[in-house]
Image (cartoon, helix red, strand yellow):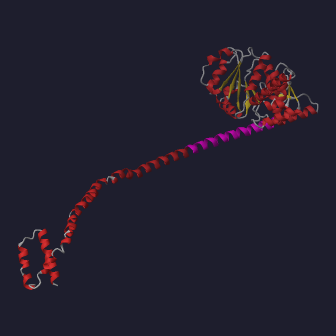
Amino acid sequence: MKPFRNAYEAIKRLLSKLFGGGEEKEEVNTSPVPEKTESKPEPEKTEPKPEPKKPEPAKQEPKKPEPQKQEPKKQESKKQEPKKPEPKKQEPKKQEPKKAESKKSAEEDMEAYVRESERKEQEAYAAEAKRRAERAARREAEEKRAEQRAARREMEAQAGMGVRRVTDPVTGEEVPLGALPTRAVPLKKYSKIASTSDDVILSVNSILRHPDMSKNIVILGKNGFGTVRVGEDFARSFFAMDLVKSDKIAKIKAKQLNKIGLEKLQSLKGGCLIIENAGLVTPAKLVEVIKNSAPEENDYVVILTGEIDSLARFFEDNQDVADQFIYLVGIHKIKEKGMISLARGYFREKGFTADKPVYEHLKQSLSSMEEGNIDRFLEFLDKVMEATKTREVSEGNGGHNEVLVEDVHKA
């Protein structure tokens, strides 16, 4: 036990030297040692043993700066603390619900506006559909009466009671229908169409019987169907029969006519003016045109072409204008059979011939266009005849003018 005691005392002395204990403590501590160990003073030589333990204080010395090494970490954490502006960045997010609410409110307002607009459009559409249905019903009733009159005339003709008779639109009297004048060549292709021929023949013959009355004509077609070519045929026939003084023909759309001054029509004097989509012309402008077309002014004929419903509505609302248009020609009643009759008459008018297979293929071509669209169909027939001429010239047979099926395919 004494060596341990000496080692302990040696360590104490070493520590006191290291940490400033002084030599006085050594004198106090060394006095009892000789008394207890007089025979064995050698254990004091064990002092070198703790000397290897000198690194221990050195090991403890770096422990003091350890807190200092940790302090930068604390400072770093403290320095990182100012990086807390995140709540400020999130402040706009607090306003997002308001923006969302306002956006939602705007969308709801827009939806309400759209619903209201759709409702108004549906109401307007329903009202217009009702008016169209009423006009269609009246027109259907009139067509039935016309069919009955036609059937009665046919029965009279079969019974040998006389020629076909019709009602004169000027006097209202029953008069013979008659035949189309020979000089009205452009109109002959319509004379074989059962649903239209009476209107064409009656209008021309009535104009001839009443040369002092208005010659203005209304040509009624289906919605979106072209009937301008029919107006042109009337204008050329009028000039051929000396019903107008000039062969000048002017064509203008109703919306364009609404915007121009009538001084531009002065060069048309003595000719014919064709107004397309006439149901869209303003009543005031049409009144101006009628006054401008009077014999004492520029003396030209006004031919209105357009969709039957729009024109019927126009004349219902403007009775004073309607009195200036005595003659109505219904092209809207033409069906497939009438279109093929029109093709036969048009080929004859232009000096061409065609066999039955050609007309069968023309029926197939009609499936790709609107039935009753005279303008488009006559334009197609023009291309067919042009293909015929080109083929015959290439074959060295020019001038024969015989339409073949291959010409229909090339058109």
Q: Nearer the viewer, residue 332 or 309?
A: 332
Q: Is residue 167 above or below residue 127?
A: above
Q: How many marks?
A: 0
Q: Residue at x 86, y 36 (%)?
A: 151
The answer to whether one can see residue 355 in this image is yes
Residue at 75%, 17% in the rendered image: 212
- Residue 405 in the image, given as x and y percentages of width and height: 84, 32
Residue 409 against residue 22 in the figure, above or below = above
From this view, report whether residue 100 is shown above or below residue 227.
below
Residue 120 counted in the magenta span = yes
On the rendered structure, is 14 left or right of 86? left
Query: Front-most of 186 and 170?
Result: 186
270, above or below 70, in the image: above
User: x, y percentage for residue 121?
Assistant: 59, 42
Q: Quadrant of residue 196?
A: top right
The quarter in which the N terminus is drawn is bottom left
Q: Is residue 347 left or right of residue 245?
A: right
**Image location (x, y in percent) of residue 134:** 70, 40
Q: How far from the left and from the top, in percent, is residue 363?
A: 82, 36
| Residue drawn 72% across the image and 30% down it | 226
Which region shows up in magenta?
A: 117-146
Quadrant assignment, res 390: top right
**Foreground residue among 8 and 273:** 8
